[in-house]
Amino acid sequence: MSAVFVTATGTDIGKTFITSGLIRYLRGTGRAVHAIKPVVTGFAPDAWRDSDPAALLAALGRSINLEEIEGISPWRSKAPLSPDMAARCEGRTIPFAEVVEFCRKTLRSHPGTVLIEGIGGVMVPLDEHRTVLDWISMLRIPVILVTGTYVGTISHTLTSLEVLARRNLDIAAVAVSESEGSPASLDETIESISRFADALDVIGIPRLPTGTFEYPAFGRIAGLISS
């Protein structure tokens, strides 16, 4: 069994796109793969078919229904806010220890590759005291950091890499998902990040048509997390 945590420099960067692409690539090569996204915000009960968990289920080739979504995303909130704020709007908190145990149970019970998709960026708060970084630190599994080519991405990426390194976490790869309308090119962004990334694999993925996942970069990332 291999496992990886997919996190990002912020929200709406491309975590679900990257995770879905990896799932489809691994399935296409005949390998066993499972994925979960335990914490979700901005989950509209009347539009769940367009949610991130639904996209993961589609990539996994599973039925897309609320019961299946419950199985991979137990903690869902309606407000499109950070998990701590979104849960507070509903009069509750994110149970950090239960989230960690849910991930550990998933890792124990699924062979092949398990992808755990986080929420927001590395430092997004989950509750009053813990962040996504604390979540990753409890699991101690390799990390894929997803970033974009938007203005500011270099600083956000290097800051995220710094905090991950300070926790002695294994960074499997940096995946640069091309941002829509960015003035910086994908190649320029990869080159800039690579100069400061201490020999990490920095892999670029251009904007692809909706539903397109056949791109060599997914194979490169899959090779890094399966080795």
Image: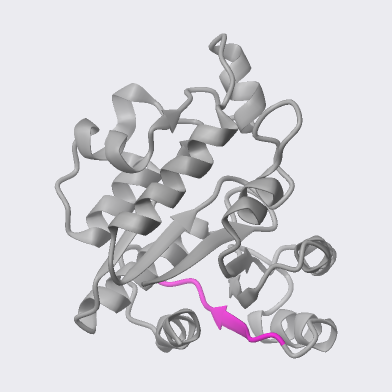
> Is residue 56 shown above or below 161?
above
Residue 179: image quadrant is bottom right
In the image, is 50 to the left or to the right of 157? left
Q: How many marks?
A: 0
Camera-side residue of 94 and 218: 94
Residue 140: image quadrant is bottom right
Specify the segment rendered in magenta: 200-208
Percent position (x, y) of residue 220?
47, 88
Residue appearing at x 65%, y 73% in the figure: 170
**Is residue 226 shown to the viewer in this render?**
yes
Residue appearing at x 72%, y 37% in the figure: 130
User: Which image quarter is the N terminus in?
Assistant: bottom left
Camera-side residue of 214 and 168: 168
Percent position (x, y) of residue 56?
32, 54
> Is residue 100 shown above or below 28?
above
Q: Residue furthest left?
A: 63
In the image, is 32 to the left or to the right of 82? left
In the image, is 29 to the left or to the right of 155? left
**Is residue 209 shown to the viewer in this render?**
no
Residue appearing at x 33%, y 43% in the figure: 72
Residue appearing at x 48%, y 54% in the figure: 117
Q: Residue furthest top?
A: 91
Q: How is the image coloured?
A: one colour
> Is residue 88 shown above or below 115?
above
The verdict on residue 168 being magenta is no
Camera-side residue of 49 and 29: 29
Percent position (x, y) of residue 199?
75, 90
Percent position (x, y) of residue 38?
44, 41
In the image, is 12 to the left or to the right of 39? right
